[in-house]
Image (spheres, helix red, strand yellow):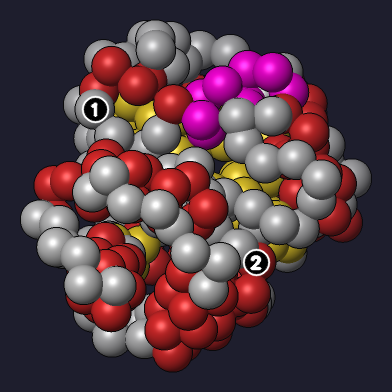
Amino acid sequence: MHAAHVPARPPPRQGSRQGCARHIALRRETWHRGAMQPTAIFDLDGTLVDSVPDIHAALNRLMGSRLLKGFPRHQVLGFIGDGVPTLLARAFDSREATQDAAALPDFMADYEASAAVHTRPFDGIPAVLDSLQAAGWRLAVCTNKPEGAARILLNSLGMADRFSALGGGDSFPTRKPDPAHLLATLSAAGGDPARAVMIGDHHNDVAAARGAGVPAVFAGWGYGPLEAADGAPVAERPDQLAALLAACLDGSAAGPTSIK
């Protein structure tokens, strides 16, 4: 994980300004000790990374191996977000075919071997992760992708060390939209629900956050339709996240048009 940059303490000023400066410095020191450190919890597919090209390719290879027709990209987009078992169930159902017992392990073996061929972080994601860490944020990933595949992907992209915890779809007994998935990931990261924000592009992310009592920010650059934000504030680009996450913590963020 990249080391967080601690801004230099401002020079003392007279009167109330001096007291304010001391208060700000104390808050910064406390954040970096971890007692009040906020946590940004990110979804993976469609939020941190554009992973559809490799999911699409692996799914079509699986279907071809069963002598079934593959899918266009837009249809695969509609399959993802609820975990791999649901992805495959939707694919086979759409072809009116019975899913065989080997389909899931075959897909996972193929996908894990090729998860980062075309998958890349969305433009602006590395920079915003840098800025959040420099501002004292702890980072975590909460995804319905199996933990092993998610870890392989993040390691392949050189991103794994940024995150204090990775909660995959099989890491805990539940998965999003169940808020227990988010809360377990947050706990593994050492975070506090009162100082956390969930960022994702799927209605499951928003639902999990609301159930956990955690603010949600909808990733408008991702795969989900704007309606999936369900009233949560929307960041249209990753470079809008830092300001919007800070606004969520102080309670001033509201509605899908709060950041443009």
At horizontal 29% and vertical 34% (from top left) the residue drawn is 224
Q: Return the x and y of residue 183 as percentages of the image width and height.
A: 78, 37
Q: Which residue is mark 2?
A: 147
Q: Which mark is residue 225?
A: 1
Q: Return the x and y of residue 81 as percentages of the image width and height.
A: 43, 44
Farthest residue, direction left: 72
Secondary structure of residue under mark 2? helix
Residue 66 in view (yes/no): yes
Q: Return the x and y of residue 64 as percentages of the image width and height.
A: 21, 75
Report the magenta residues as a range: 204-212
Which residue type carries mark 1?
A: Pro
Q: Is residue 206 magenta?
A: yes
At horizontal 76% and vertical 58% (from top left) the residue drawn is 171
Could you tell me if the residues under marks 2 and 1 are in contact, i.e. CB atoms within 8 Å?
A: no
Q: Is residue 9 magenta?
A: no
Category of crowding for the residue at label 1, using alpha-carbon neighbours closer than 10 angstroms: few (below 14), some (14–19), many (at least 20): some
